[in-house]
Amino acid sequence: MGITNWTSEHHSFGYVVALMLWHSVGLAVGNIVASGLLQQVTPKVALVCALTITGICGVVLSLLQDPGVVLIALLRFVEGCAAAVPLVYLPLWVDEFASSDGYWMSVLQIGVSLGHFFGTLCGASTAQWAATGWRASLLVQTCIITPLIGRVVTSPQVQVDVPTRIQTARMDCLTLQGAESSGLQNLLREMRDMIQGMNRNPLTLSLSSTLCILHAIGALLLLWSAPYLFLSADAPSGLWTQILSALVFSSLPSLGCYVGAICCSRMQGFKAGMHATALRISCAFAVLAAMCGPLNSAAEGFLARFLLLCLWLFCCGCLLPILCALLMTSMPSYLRSFNATSMFLMLHLLSFSVAPLLVTLLMGCFLRPEKALNFGVALAFWATTPAAILLIFTYAREPKSSGPSSLSGVDDLSISDVSYELARRRISTVPL
């Protein structure tokens, strides 16, 4: 009887991980094959097919009464593979048809945050009204995608398709080239050479590891912060808790990106030879975010926990443009696209898949959901400490002179350069 009660209380943890984990794995796999697909068929056909598959998977998941974790994982994996096509192609499309100042790339990234907020709001309210749980969110998603499919179908092909010569030249900036283009052996050799080129500077590994840790924590908080806040003392209703959680996840990281970029730019941290300055600023924000771990141990009420969540999201948002700029200026410019693609795979496979799975398995060891949620969120906050220590160690090793970098192709960056690159990277890495 105890095992039965434990299963009924904790099976939702497995469902949540299946809904998120396998979608992220699908995005990672789809990112690899999307380039070859978009070069084999016209982008318009690829977009229509990808959006249609996404809608079909959402309908199937929303209509099945008890699909089971395995079927949910399979459908979410297929949905993630399909979603990778527009995620890969939209930055290329904006880059070709929009103005060259990077404004519309930022608008595209803002659309991700707004979509996350309104999607959560509509999904939560619909789920409460229809009493169907997470299935209602997928049904709302399908209803939104349907007119978008019609819009793409009725649009002239010249307004959707990027010229083939431009697409071939730029597609490797967004995804790994398929093995069929040059042979598997040549592809592996080229990837090895690029990885060795990135690792010439020790900053690359430490900053990439820091970003993986921060995004893993963000994924954990996105999963468990709303029920964690709801179980706090003096918490509002479930719907209002979900709305407040979605609001801070949608707004504070973006606000932090702007503040962090302004601070780093004012102190000339975006210059190619000013890594120590940028690292010093990032250490300050990282230490402030790491304080959420010990402070969370003493937080019992809703307001205290909510403010800690806001503080962490804002500080990590401030870190993103600084770490992104450090990665851009720590390697030659021709390696930046490969680095962005490598980070995409690492984030979706490690931060958004493996880390939530491991933490959820640990949470399953608790008999009470309240204890499990307290453990999961506390572990997420405390995991910021190793990221802060890693940044401090990196700053201690970094030469403090402000001389020019010895890497060829490394140049100074402006806020617009960092904003463009960060907007492209953040399109598929909600919430950070």
Image (cartoon, rainbow, N blue to C red):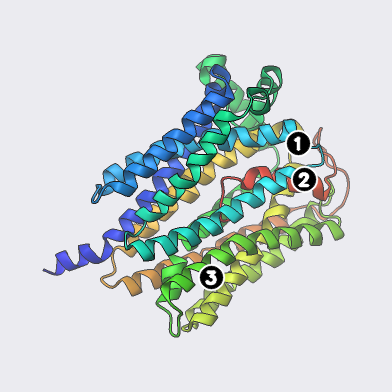
Mark number, residue 123: none
Measure the alpha-carbon separation of dots 1 and 2. Answer: 8 Å
Circle 3 residue? 244
Residue furthest to the right: 403
Q: If you read the primary sequence from the N terminus, does the residue marked by circle 2 or circle 3 appear first? A: 2
Circle 2 residue? 103
Residue furthest to the left: 1
For the N terminus, which image quadrant? Answer: bottom left
Circle 1 residue? 98
For the C terminus, which image quadrant? Answer: bottom right
Quadrant position of residue 377: bottom left
Q: Are marks 1 and 2 in contact (CB under 8 Å)?
A: yes
Percent position of residue 391, x then y: 66, 58
Percent position of residue 429, x then y: 56, 49
Q: How many marks?
A: 3
Q: Residue at x 66, y 42 (%)?
A: 424
Classed neighbour count for the residue bearing mark 3: other residues with Cα under 10 Å, few (<14), some (14–19), many (≥20): some
Q: Residue at x 87, y 43 (%)?
A: 404
Q: If you read the primary sequence from the N terminus, does the residue marked by circle 1 or circle 3 appear first? A: 1
User: Helix, strand or loop at disc 1?
Assistant: loop
Q: Disc 1 marks which amino acid?
A: Ala
Residue 235 appears anywhere in the view: yes
Percent position of residue 169, x then y: 70, 22
* 141, 203: nearer the viewer: 141
User: Helix, strand or loop at disc 2?
Assistant: helix
Task: State left or right for residue 3 relative to residue 29.
Answer: left
Residue 377 appears anywhere in the view: no
